[in-house]
Amino acid sequence: MIRSGVVNETGRRARYNLWTLGTLLVAAFVAAPVLSVLVLATAPSGDIWRHLSSTVLPHYIETTLLLMAGVGAGTLVIGVGAAWVVTMCRFPGSRLFEWALLLPLAVPAYVIAYVYTDLLEYAGPVQGALREMFGWRNRRDYWFPEIRSLGGAVAMMTLVLYPYVYVVSRAAFLEQSVCVLEASRTLGKNAWQSFFHVALPLARPAIVIGVSLALMETLNDFGTVDYFAVKTFTAGIFDVWLNMSSTAGAAQLAAVMLAFVLAIIGLERWARRGRRFHATSTRYSALPSYRLTGLRALGAVLLCALPVAFGFLVPAGLLLAYAARHYEDSLNGPFLSYLANSLALSSSSAAIAVAVGLFLAYGVRLSKAAFVRAVARFASVGYALPGAVLAVGVMIPLAALDNAIDAAFRSAFGISTGLLLSGTTVAITIGYIARFLALSFGTVEASLTKITPSMDGAARTLGLGPAATLARVHLPMMRGSVLSAAILVFVDGMKELPMTMLLRPFNFDTLATYVHQFASREHFEEAAVGALAIVVAGMLPVILLSATIRQSRPGHAIPPPIAAPARALDLS
């Protein structure tokens, strides 16, 4: 019997079996949207690309870069600063802020944009109170920052995306050895110098992952930039596809956007080429705790309290007030059907994404081939791509398959099947799986690596095959990670807007599209119940994270939600 294979990293030949071949086939299917975008980008698009290059493309590039720079700087300062303060210092409320700083993660960027626009616009209560207080009559009598602007978009996204940086930075600081910090103090470094010269370089890889995740979410955003009329690449893709009816032009814009994403990852790797930062000790005692008093304590409280207040308390409070006034209208309208659509899509996508991620991760474990691992990780690159980009990639193969099925039925039976997959919930589900697979695959793979291979061997000696070993040995040990992955995918599916808008069937809405439609018509208060439901759904993983983050210090299990982003972005 002939067995084919490749040489793995240990120098041994890894055999291909049915499980490995299945892993490659599943990975190829999930990666099809990404590959489709790249293929379609090479197709001729007429004069649209020339028109875009000479008109709006430079503005798309400039606006996108400025937005990324602003959000990157804001999330870096707030996330790293807050993580260091609550990890290393003690001040009034420090234990509360450890978990409260994660709460803005539950609020979608477009929801907070709608809330603050309603609060801060000219006809809103803030400017109305200022005019009443100072006797101003109109806009010419005073200056007030324009919320619907690039600066406003930067502020809104920073408020809800800094937790990505905070959570991985705090985990990195908790994992650091106390010895290196003590050594820096013996060399004459004060607390701030130890932070900048020792702790920050050691945490740099984790911080970069957090900032990269925040920037990728920035690129994926459509609701905020559309509401604020900020022309980014995502808004351009919608315009070219829907208004100019050019799929090829949209794919070419998407390819340029993909280059932005790859540049985010590649630039940092190039910047730290040849540099490695490691903790050189295995002694992990309690971290030093600096007690702050006076102005320093006040500064620490403000650093932690302001992001929580503006990123969660104010929008959540306003949503509750709006929902209390309009809940009857929402419950008597189509709200419940939109809620059911969101729950059904997010639940099914979470179940399938976890099953696919588990299959791929276990296939990589069984194969031990570098090629299989690379293919599986490429299939999970969808999390690094904006939803609008993946939507283009999903439509291309599904439309080709629909046309092939329709042609076959016309030829054989003289009937037209129409669109069986395109423009259905199947398309949205495939898009969700392609985008969020990295969360499930990364979480499961991280959990599998903690299970010693000797347990596989013991199961084999007891007569269990690969599938039985997974079901009876690995899954019971990984149920916490599998549940965490399912929750993360479910919550991200509830919040996903651009992909849902492009792939949804006619007369089909989710909570995200429902809220966006009301907000675009300046009737956000009527959709407050829907927005509040999205926020409540997003609070579940926040509670899980806050309950387990303290155990990320060596000697405890690293919580899967913290480990997952690192695996998702490891494209090497």
Image (spheres, rainbow, N blue to C red):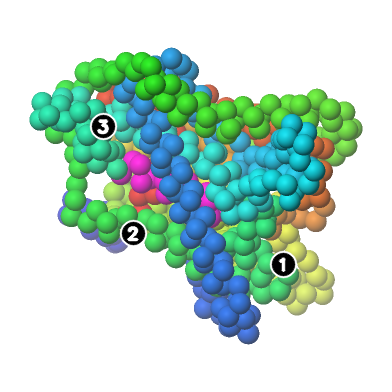
Q: Is residue 431 left or right of residue 508?
A: left
How far across and down, in percent of the image, does residue 150 sit? Answer: 59, 54
Residue under numbered circle 1 = 242
From the viewer's perspective, is residue 423 above or below residue 547?
A: below
**Secondary structure mostly seen in the magenta stretch:** helix
Look at the numbered disc 3 and give the secondary structure of its residue.
helix
Front in this rendered view, residue 39 or 164: 164
Residue at image coords 61%, 70%: 250
Look at the numbered disc 1 and give the secondary structure of its residue.
helix
Front in this rendered view, residue 160 or 367: 160
Whether residues under marks 1 and 3 lie with C-beta atoms below 8 angstroms apart, the answer is no
How far across and down, in percent of the image, does residue 340 sit? Answer: 75, 37
Residue under numbered circle 3 = 192
Q: Which of the two discs, 1 and 3, sits closer to the camera?
A: 3
Front in this rendered view, residue 23 or 429: 429
Residue 267: which numbered mark, if any? 2
The magenta region covers 205-220
CA gap, disc 2 to disc 1? 33 Å
